[in-house]
Image: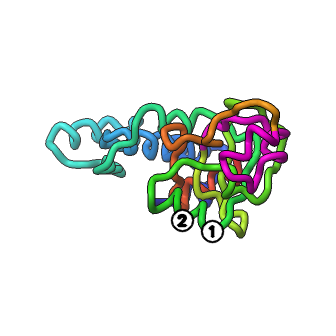
């Protein structure tokens, strides 16, 4: 997939709107929609399309469509902070379909509330996922590294076992991770 961060506005008549078009095509392909970007100012392009020929750039739909909720998590929410994970947590999220537990957290960055979106980062700080936290940042500072049964004793109340449930998380591709880091 094209790295959308490498494409920018070149002139007042150039590709200024192209980044937005490419981002829209990427989002549509994730929802299972083929997308064709054409030059609509050239009438002959439409005749070519009617003949069944592509007169532009075709973005094929992804075979595995992401859910509306995960699409919203990925594109609709701005991350308010980040959580750095140990190697075991990274492996569990990426390869075992696990939820994030406090025991896998090494560092908490930013001021975020319960329900805010956060980036989940590997040991080098590279984003690997995005999700909505079930805890405030201040609570995570207190419980990071703890096992689930220790959370109540530390916070003084019974919170959720999962910091981020798997259903409230989306794994990031390399291009999505780069875009999330910039945005």
Which segment did they paint magenta? 131-154
Q: How many marks?
A: 2
Q: Which residue is mark 2?
A: 91
Q: From the viewer's perspective, is 43 left or right of 180?
A: left
Q: From the viewer's perspective, is 143 left or right of 131?
A: right
Q: Is residue 87 magenta?
A: no
Residue closest to the far left: 51
Q: From the viewer's perspective, is 77 left or right of 49?
A: right
Q: Residue 155, how many percent across, how many down?
A: 81, 37
| Residue 53 in view here | yes
* Residue in the foreground of this view, choosing between 125 and 49: 125
The residue shown at (79%, 51%) is: 108
Task: Give the Cα distance between marks 1 and 2.
Answer: 6 Å
The residue shown at (68%, 55%) is: 103
Q: Residue 117, how many percent across, how many down?
A: 67, 38
Q: Which mark is residue 87?
A: 1
Q: In the picture shown, does residue 43 fall above or below 180?
A: above
Classify the position of the N terminus by image quarter. bottom left
The residue shown at (43%, 43%) is: 25
Q: Residue 59, how many percent across, how many down?
A: 35, 50
């Amino acid at each position: 997939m094209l790295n959308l961060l490498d494409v920018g506005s070149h002139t007042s008549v150039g590709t200024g709107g192209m980044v937005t078009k490419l981002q829209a095509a990427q989002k549509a392909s994730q929802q299972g929609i083929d997308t064709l970007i054409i030059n609509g100012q050239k009438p002959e392009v439409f005749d070519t399309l009617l003949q069944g020929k592509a007169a532009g750039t075709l973005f094929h739909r992804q075979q595995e469509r992401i859910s509306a909720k995960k699409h919203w998590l990925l594109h609709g929410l701005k991350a308010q902070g980040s959580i750095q994970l140990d190697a075991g947590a990274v492996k569990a999220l990426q390869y075992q379909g696990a939820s994030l537990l406090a025991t896998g957290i090494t560092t908490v960055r930013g001021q975020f509330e319960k329900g805010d979106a956060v980036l989940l980062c590997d040991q080098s700080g590279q984003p690997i996922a995005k999700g909505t936290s079930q805890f405030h940042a201040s609570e995570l500072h207190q419980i990071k590294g703890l096992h689930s049964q220790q959370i109540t004793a530390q916070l003084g109340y019974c919170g959720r076992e999962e910091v981020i449930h798997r259903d409230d998380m989306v794994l990031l591709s390399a291009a999505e991770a780069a875009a999330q880091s910039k945005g």
